[in-house]
Image (cartoon, rainbow, N blue to C red):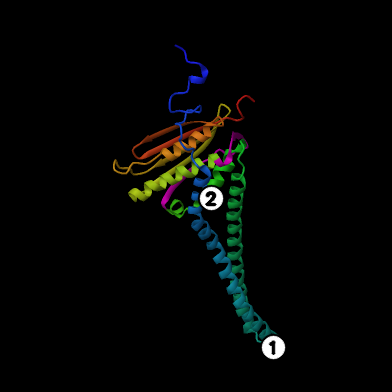
Amino acid sequence: MQLPESDKTLPGMNESGQQSGEKKPDFEALELEFLGSMLPGIVHNLATPLSGVIGATQLLEMRVGEQERLLNELDRGVTTSADALKVQHQKSCSNLDIMSRNARHLTDLLQVIIRRFHRCGQNTPGPVSLFELVSNELQFLDANLTYKHKVRKRFDLAHDSYTVFAVYKHVVAVIDEFVLRSLAAHDFSRGLVEVNVTTNYEAGNGILQLEAKFFETDEEPLETDSIDMFLARLGENGASYETHHEKGNLTITITFPRQAKGT
């Protein structure tokens, strides 16, 4: 007997196929929790070049008085002060170079952070540059000091102007969760973790592949449920994905459409 349309939902399930009473994941809370965990590293990464600028500035301030003294001696005809003044000048130039390099580094870090928060504030799907998104997020993740210093990384990103159809923050969330799961493997085993990230374009679609290699034991298997949750959200906007997990290796391949379905 064929059930009427209104009766096709299985007992205990709602129309979307979820268990009745099952709560949807609170993605906003998870995002805030993730950002909170990154704050100490963000502060550390910003403080390092800032300390370089401050230190070089203090040395320059100390040398100003010495240089003024040497200039006064030159005015009085003390010729030996000329060589000393040249040395002071060279040291000052070195300090200015340190200040300049650290200031540029600080500016680059701030641009990565600002770009990340600005783009992740957009909740609607649209054209997204895979290269810009992935490269920016991988730089942002350097705020996680374990990822920055304890993970061997290899990136092969297709550098072109093609865009894919997606929600920027949803793609970022998958990358972040993938890296966090990889870091969990490092925390468990204390062994080397390798993360490989590749982007490409095939048959008009954008491809993002995430691969992690790590030491895994039966007692401490890598948990992937949270990654699956974020991947399912990507599927709502037309992306497809494959997950391959065997002991010591997790590979996720995501295929993004170039444009929305039906356009």
Q: Amino acid at mark 1?
A: Arg
Is 175 contained in the magenta span? no
How many residues crowd around disc 1 within 10 Å: few (fewer than 14), some, or many (20 or more)?
Answer: few
Image location (x, y in percent) of residue 89: 62, 73
Number of disc labels = 2
Between residue 187 and residue 16, name the one nearer to us.
16
Image location (x, y in percent) of residue 164: 59, 34
The quadrant in which residue 236 appears is: top right
Image location (x, y in percent) of residue 40: 49, 58
Q: Nearer the viewer, mark 1 or mark 2?
A: 2
* Residue at the spot of label 1: 76
Point out the image quarter for the C terminus: top right
Point out the image quarter for the N terminus: top left
Q: How far apart are the two marked residues, 1 and 2, measured between alpha carbons?
A: 56 Å
How many residues crowd around disc 2 within 10 Å: few (fewer than 14), some, or many (20 or more)?
Answer: many
- Is any atom of residue 160 visible in this view? no
* Residue at the spot of label 2: 140
Is 168 contained in the magenta span? yes
- Determine the secondary structure under disc 2: helix
The quadrant in which residue 47 appears is: bottom right
Q: Is residue 217 left or right of residue 232?
A: left
Q: Residue furthest right?
A: 75
75 relative to 261, above or below: below
- Is any atom of residue 251 visible in this view? yes
- Determine the secondary structure under disc 1: loop
Please report the bounds of the magenta region as a residue range: 150-169
Between residue 160 and residue 193, name the one nearer to us.
193
